[in-house]
Amino acid sequence: MAVKHPDSAPAPLQGGPLRILCLGLPRTGSSSTAEALRILGHHRVHHGTEMLLEGWDVTWIARAAKAHFPSLSSPKEPRPMPFTRAQWDDIFGSFDAVTDYGCMLAIPLIAAYPEAKVILVHRDIDDWERSVNEVIIDRFWPRRTPSALLVRCLVWLAGAKEPVINGIQQTFLGRFGAAGPDELRANLRTVYVQHMREVQEAVPPEQLLHYRLGDGWEPLCEFLGKEVPEGVPFPRRNDAKAFGVLYDRFQRQKIRGIVWVLVRYGILLAIIAGVALQYRRIAALW
C-alpha cells in the first residue's frame, strides 16, 4: 500500500551512524536522490553542495582527499593518516545518509560503515562525461585566456583564493588520478568504470542497489523497505543549477577581493605619485 508524503519539517538530529551511502559519482543525480531519501523519511541527508550553500564547513573533504589519495602527497607535506571511523562519525554522525561529495571517498566510507546500505546510481557515460566537463571542470578550471590569467594574478594579489575551491579541485584530481584539468578530462571515462567496479566488489550484493536515473520509486523503496509515496512524483532536482549558484558565490567573493586589491594598490600608487611630485617640487627649490 502506498503512503502519503511525510511532513516536510526537519527531523531532530538522530546521531547516526550512517545507514545509507549514495555512492554514484558527481553528476549522477545526487540532489534528486537526496530529496527522494528525505521524502521517504530520511530527513538528515548530507549533500556537499547543499551544505556549502547553507554555510556548513566542508573543508574536511580536502583533508580526507590528502589522506586517502596518494597522488596528492608531497615531499614537503607529510601525508595524513587515513580517516578512522571516529573521524567519519565526527563529520557524518548526525546524518542518516550521505550523497554527493561522499562518493569521492567511496571505498573508505564502505570500510568505515560496513553495515550501511549502498545506492550506486548509474548514468549514461557519454551524458555523464559531458556534464562533468561543462558543470565542473569548465568552471573550476577555466581556460587560460589572457583575461583569465589576469584575474588569477589579481586574485593572488588580493589573497582571495577560497579554500573550498582548492578542496574541490584537489579532491577531483586525487579521485581521478590527475595532475591537472587536461589529465582529469582524459581520465573521466576510465575512472567512472573503475569506480562502479570497485563499489560492486566492496559491497555484499544484498546491501547494494544498482539504480539508473529514471527508474523511479519502486526499486529504491523495495531496497530500503519503504512503501512508494502516494501521488508523489520522483524528484527531479537540478544539480547543475545548484552548482552554478555555488560557483557564482565564489566568483563574487573573488570579485570583492579583486576590487579591494585594486583600491589598495590604487591608494598606494597615489601616495607614491604624491610623494614623488612633492620631492620634485622640493628639488626645484634647490
Image: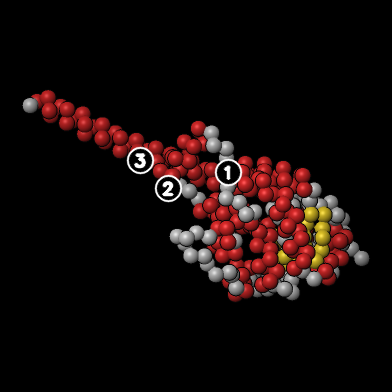
Mark 1 lies on residue = 141
Q: Secondary structure at mark 3?
A: helix
Looking at the image, residue 25 lies above or below residue 94 = above
Amino acid at the residue labelled 3: Arg
Which one is earlier in the sequence, the residue at label 3 or at label 1?
A: 1
The colour scheme used here is: secondary structure
Amino acid at the residue labelled 2: Gly
Mark 2 lies on residue = 159
Which quadrant would residue 41 be assigned to in this image? bottom right
Q: How crowded is the residue under tag 3: few (<14 C-alpha within 10 Å), some, or many (20+)? A: few
Which one is earlier in the sequence, the residue at label 2 or at label 3?
A: 2
Q: Please identify the quadrant where the N terminus is shown.
A: bottom right
Q: Residue at x 57, y 37 (%)?
A: 143
Which one is earlier in the sequence, the residue at label 2 or at label 1?
A: 1
Which quadrant would residue 261 be assigned to in this image? top left
Amino acid at the residue labelled 1: Trp
Disc number at residue 264? Answer: 3
The extreme front residue here reads: 75
Q: Secondary structure at mark 1?
A: loop
Disc number at residue 35? Answer: none
Looking at the image, residue 54 lies above or below residue 203 = above
Residue 56 visible within the image = no
